[in-house]
Image (cartoon, rainbow, N blue to C red):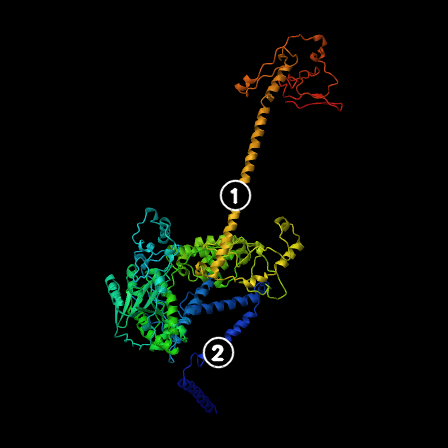
């Protein structure tokens, strides 16, 4: 029995051993215990959810956790589980080749170091996960673009906008940003330095070929002008303004379009308005391509272009490492040949092509020439006459899309390769792939021009209306003028409004200071504002207002190089912004402009003149009484308006007749009660019923209409000008009268003051001074007074030292009379005795007193404090209250 059982068990074990082998034959397991990836992911996701749920039921950090921590069992359990978790984390980090000393607890800063290790490990793991997902998605990171020798390979930017979908079932391709980090800056080799000053742009042209109207003298003498020593350090645009002021030239010549007259009188010939057979392009492989990089080759190219009837033009531009931007390449294609011009090397000689570009008999075909026209003017002084823009034609034809990529696909069946659309075109020598991409932009453009011209005629039943509209729109594009970005105190507001962020006064001040710093540094270093400090980083710093420089670095990812260099200066700007008081942004702007913020009246009614539902562009946030009013001026010829008149959004005039109130003086307005103020606000809520006939806030008045004598606008403007001149004349006359009256009154007052002064001086001539009176009193007390021989008892005062010698001569001696001796029998001899009169109890400071009772004290000192100081000491006297009053001693 036992043997049979053993045999059965051996058979069963053999059957069990054969089952795994069968399973392995069917398919290998992805992981021990899991058949495939989906099963493993499903189990792992469930385990993560359970762990997250269990962690949520743990005691919360704080008093609750501290309470449970006081129990030894809970504390031991936490330590054991914590060690297991740290061990698992260390194994995972070691598996991914990261630092795994996470269980080291010897150092005081162990917790912070462990946290940093976890963060670094997560970054490494997530980066590997991203690489694996990219490979699973079909992105081959091993492929490298063609790069010149000595340059670093570029990084791949994977996003939705740089994906190119293919027609087949293959996965999308990714565009590559071809950039060079170590390329020398081409601006350093330019003969003329780039003008980044905060001054208007002035045209570079000095020779005007194919001219119907000669070039203004300002531009012709510009090249032969000698610089003065004081103008050597002045920017070119500012030096031109200084020269214009010195020579008193008209300022309009500096900013006028040089070919304005030629373009206004340009007429399209009938040959360009008639239908022609489209001329097929040559294959790009069979077409000769020439790279122009010397002056001789450029002159030869100009001779070839003059002989053709049309040619296509396109530009390649770079704006990231330059403030204004720089044109790096120009592609020109004729019916037979393609040309690529190195505009960085021939920047100062490109004006030679004006002979072909301004020839009205040659058609210049562009696509989207709005930016190209401005770049040609800014960098080379080139202008285009007789332009045909295929982008404008595409809009007139209402095509599905208006890009050049779509036109190539629609008319030529060519799929354009846009991998190098964002490449750095400053790279020299130019790679073959980039040269091929540049050729393709203009090689097919002349054939597209023929096809679109024929389609415009066919869609309009052979009429030339649509084709003429395209020529007109193209001419308007060629009339565009380049405008240099000018920094003003309110430039930051436009950028801030585009961001649609609500900022307080501190944040808005920080944004304003950072914007000014970025603009100044970008002009100095000739870098774009996006390179110095991108707008989103500037908004982040303004919102956070970091207290330390490290906080500014933390707001920027990646950190721009100039921000890292100037971080201390940025920190000072942020500190200055933090010192501002907190207010709402709208109120702060109104206070900075000098306006008083007024709350909008809440009107519950709705009507034609209800302001509660009016749009913001028409609403006036300020009452009419607070707005500055310029009397008698409807149209101003001044280009530079004052700040006060920029605040006026509509026409504001003082009311002559009021319906609800009478004109009040400033004293009455200041003494209004609370109820009267509320009544005034209610009355101000009613809008002017005639406002509907006034122009809106953004009305545009044509400047030509002001200067045209035949227009009604000119008549109205002249009438208002005459009225304003008459009113100004009256004001000047009244001001003159007021000045004359004020002068007369001042003259009268001065004469009266002079008379009073003279009379006062005359009255003081015969008056004795205080010193003279004191000397006379001293003589009387010492019995040394000399009596007059004629009148006893009277003394002749001495002449003052201040009197002049002439005044002494004027004083005449009194007439002498006969001498009569004084009868002493009739005099009161008690005056000379030491006995005091009892009836005189009043204190006399000039009179001496002697008290026989007061003798010398024990110390031998005299008790009389007034000895020798008769005129300055206060002596003791009898009081009216019946007791003696001791006066202070000296």
> Is 52 above or below relative to 868?
below
Front residue (pair 674, 191): 674
Q: Does label 2 or label 1 sit earlier along the sequence?
A: 2
Q: Percent position (x, y) of residue 568?
A: 44, 53
Q: Percent position (x, y) of residue 511?
A: 48, 57
Q: Residue at x 38, y 80 (%)?
A: 169
Q: Is residue 115 left or right of residue 179?
A: right
Name the element at disc 2.
helix
Front residue (pair 596, 246): 246
Q: Percent position (x, y) of residue 240?
A: 36, 52
Q: Residue furthest front?
A: 710
**Residue 509 seen by the camera:** no
The residue where tag 1 is placed is 736
Q: Nearer the viewer, mark 2 or mark 1?
A: 1
**Residue 884 seen by the camera:** yes
Quadrant in which residue 127 is drawn: bottom left
Decide: marks 2, 1 in contact (CB < 8 A)?
A: no
Front residue (pair 604, 74): 604
Name the element at disc 1.
helix
Q: Is residue 125 left or right of residue 231?
A: right
Quarter of the image that includes the C terminus: top right
The residue where tag 2 is placed is 42
Q: Percent position (x, y) of residue 396?
A: 40, 73
Quadrant in which residue 462 is drawn: bottom left
> Is 1 above or below relative to 777?
below
Q: CA distance from mark 2 to mark 1?
A: 97 Å
């Amino acid at each position: 029995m036992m043997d049979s059982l053993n045999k059965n068990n051996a058979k069963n074990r053999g059957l069990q051993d054969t089952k795994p082998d069968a399973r392995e034959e069917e398919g290998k397991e992805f992981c021990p215990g899991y058949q495939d990836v989906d099963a493993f992911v499903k189990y792992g996701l469930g385990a993560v959810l359970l762990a997250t749920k269990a962690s949520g039921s743990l005691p919360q950090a704080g008093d609750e956790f501290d309470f449970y921590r006081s129990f030894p069992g809970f504390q031991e359990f936490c330590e054991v589980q914590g060690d297991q978790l740290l061990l698992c984390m260390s194994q995972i980090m070691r598996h991914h080749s990261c630092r795994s000393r996470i269980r080291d607890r010897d150092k005081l800063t162990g917790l912070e170091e462990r946290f940093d290790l976890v963060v670094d490990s997560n970054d490494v793991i997530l980066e590997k996960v991203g690489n694996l997902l990219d490979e699973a998605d079909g992105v081959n990171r091993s492929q490298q673009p063609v790069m010149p020798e000595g340059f670093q390979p570029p990084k791949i930017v994977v996003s939705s906008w740089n994906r190119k979908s293919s027609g087949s079932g293959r996965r999308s391709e990714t565009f590559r940003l071809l950039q060079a980090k170590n390329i020398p800056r081409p601006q350093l080799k330019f003969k003329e330095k780039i003008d980044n000053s905060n001054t208007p742009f002035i045209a570079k042209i000095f020779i005007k070929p194919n001219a119907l109207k000669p070039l203004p003298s300002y531009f012709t003498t510009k090249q032969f002008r000698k610089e003065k020593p004081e103008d050597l350090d002045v920017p070119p645009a500012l030096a031109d303004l200084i020269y214009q002021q010195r020579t008193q030239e008209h300022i309009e010549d500096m900013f006028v379009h040089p070919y304005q007259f030629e373009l206004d009188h340009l007429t399209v010939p009938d040959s360009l308005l008639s239908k022609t057979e489209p001329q097929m392009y040559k294959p790009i492989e069979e077409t000769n391509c020439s790279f122009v990089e010397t002056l001789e080759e450029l002159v030869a190219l100009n001779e070839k272009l003059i002989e053709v009837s049309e040619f296509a033009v396109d530009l390649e531009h770079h704006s990231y490492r330059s403030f204004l931007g720089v044109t790096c390449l120009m592609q020109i294609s004729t019916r037979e040949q393609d040309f690529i011009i190195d505009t960085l090397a021939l920047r100062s000689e490109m004006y030679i092509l004006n002979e072909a570009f301004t020839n009205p008999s040659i058609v210049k075909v562009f696509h989207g020439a709005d930016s190209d026209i401005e770049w040609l003017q800014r960098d080379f002084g080139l202008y285009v006459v007789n332009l045909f823009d295929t982008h404008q034609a595409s809009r007139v034809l209402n095509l599905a899309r208006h890009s050049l990529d779509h036109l190539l696909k629609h008319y030529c069946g060519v799929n354009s390769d846009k991998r190098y659309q964002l490449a750095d075109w400053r790279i020299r020598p130019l790679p073959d792939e980039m040269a091929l991409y540049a050729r393709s932009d203009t090689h097919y453009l002349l054939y597209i021009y023929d096809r679109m011209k024929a389609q415009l005629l066919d869609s309009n039943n052979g009429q030339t209306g649509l084709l003429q509209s395209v020529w007109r729109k193209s001419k308007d594009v060629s009339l565009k003028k380049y405008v240099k970005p000018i920094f003003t105190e309110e430039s930051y507001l436009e950028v801030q409004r585009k961001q649609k962020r609500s900022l307080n006064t501190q944040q808005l001040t920080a944004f304003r200071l950072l914007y000014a710093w970025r603009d100044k540094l970008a002009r100095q270093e000739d870098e774009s504002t996006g390179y110095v400090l991108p707008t989103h980083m500037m908004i982040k710093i303004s919102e956070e207002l970091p207290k330390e420089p490290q906080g500014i670095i933390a707001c920027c990812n990646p950190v721009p190089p100039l921000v890292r260099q100037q971080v201390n200066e940025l920190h000072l700007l942020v500190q200055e912004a933090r010192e501002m008081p907190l207010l709402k942004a709208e109120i702060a702007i109104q206070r900075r402009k000098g306006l008083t913020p007024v709350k909008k009246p809440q009107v519950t009614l709705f009507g034609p003149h209800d302001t509660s539902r009016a749009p913001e562009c028409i609403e006036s946030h300020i009452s009419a009484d607070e707005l500055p009013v310029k009397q008698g001026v409807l149209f101003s010829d001044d280009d530079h308006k004052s700040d006060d008149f920029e605040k006026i959004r509509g026409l504001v005039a003082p009311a002559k007749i009021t319906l609800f109130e009478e004109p009040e003086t400033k004293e009455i307005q200041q003494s209004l009660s609370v109820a009267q103020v509320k009544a005034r606000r209610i009355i101000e809520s009613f809008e002017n019923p005639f406002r509907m006939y006034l122009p809106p806030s953004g009305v545009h008045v044509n400047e030509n209409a002001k200067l045209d004598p035949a227009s009604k606008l000119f008549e109205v403007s002249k009438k208002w000008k005459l009225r304003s001149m008459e009113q100004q004349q009256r004001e000047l006359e009244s001001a003159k009268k007021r000045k004359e009256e004020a002068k007369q009154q001042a003259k009268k007052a001065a004469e009266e003051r002079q008379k009073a002064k003279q009379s006062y001086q005359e009255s003081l001539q015969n008056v004795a001074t205080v010193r003279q009176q004191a000397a006379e009193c001293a003589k009387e007390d010492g019995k040394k007074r000399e009596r007059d021989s004629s009148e006893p008892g009277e003394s002749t005062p001495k002449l003052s030292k201040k009197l002049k010698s002439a005044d002494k001569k004027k004083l005449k001696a009194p007439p002498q009379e006969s001498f009569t001796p004084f009868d002493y029998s009739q005099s009161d001899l008690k005056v000379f005795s030491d006995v005091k009169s009892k009836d005189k109890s009043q204190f006399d400071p000039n009179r001496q007193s002697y008290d026989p009772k007061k003798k010398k004290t024990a110390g031998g000192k005299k008790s009389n404090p007034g000895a020798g100081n008769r005129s300055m000491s206060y002596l003791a006297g009898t009081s009216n209250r019946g007791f003696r009053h001791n006066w202070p001693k000296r």
